Amino acid sequence: FTDLARGTGGKCYQVGAANQVLAKLVDILTEEFSHLELDRQVLARVQELGSLDPAELACDGFSRFQAAGALARLGKRQLLGRF
């Protein structure tokens, strides 16, 4: 429950407010998974280049700012541990 509470921003809802809880979960999941393709591409570049520098990772498909955001998400998911 603690992880779920943290993931929803620590909000507390009344039992009768299930629609609010579900709406918040949908928002979180939409945000979390809306960048999967970009994250996959950046992870592939990290594996290819062995670098975590967004400027080095940037290519025609995404900017260094997008690469930096993807690195943050990948790090949060603990997918960059060996680099």
Image (cartoon, rainbow, N blue to C red):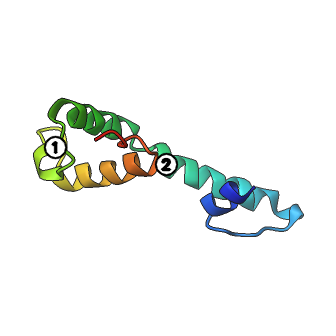
Q: Secondary structure at mark 1?
A: helix
For image coordinates 77% across by 57% down, the residue present is 19
Where does the C terminus fall, quadrant-wise? top left
Where does the N terminus fall, quadrant-wise? bottom right
**Visible residue check, residue 48:** yes
How would you rate the neighbour count of disc 2 (Cα within 10 Å): few for under 14, some for 14-19, many for 20 or more?
A: few
Residue 32, numbered label? 2
Q: Quadrant of residue 6?
A: bottom right
Q: Position of residue 15 (x, y in %)?
A: 88, 62
Judged by depth in the image, the label closer to the viewer, 2 or 1, is 1
How would you rate the neighbour count of disc 1 (Cα within 10 Å): few for under 14, some for 14-19, many for 20 or more?
A: many
- Identified by mark 1, the residue type is Leu
Q: Secondary structure at mark 2?
A: helix
Q: Are marks 2 and 1 in contact (CB under 8 Å)?
A: no
Q: Quadrant of residue 8?
A: bottom right
Badge 2 or badge 1: first in the primary sequence: 2
- Identified by mark 2, the residue type is Glu
Q: Position of residue 47 (x, y in %)?
A: 24, 32
Q: Is residue 47 left or right of residue 11?
A: left
**Which one is nearer the viewer's eye here, 28 or 23?**
28
Q: Position of residue 18 (x, y in %)?
A: 81, 57
For image coordinates 18% across by 51% down, the residue present is 54
For image coordinates 39% across by 49% down, the residue present is 75
Q: Is residue 64 left or right of residue 70?
A: left
Residue 39, numbered label? none
- Above or below, 56 relative to 23: above
Residue 57, numbered label? 1
**Visible residue check, residue 58:** no
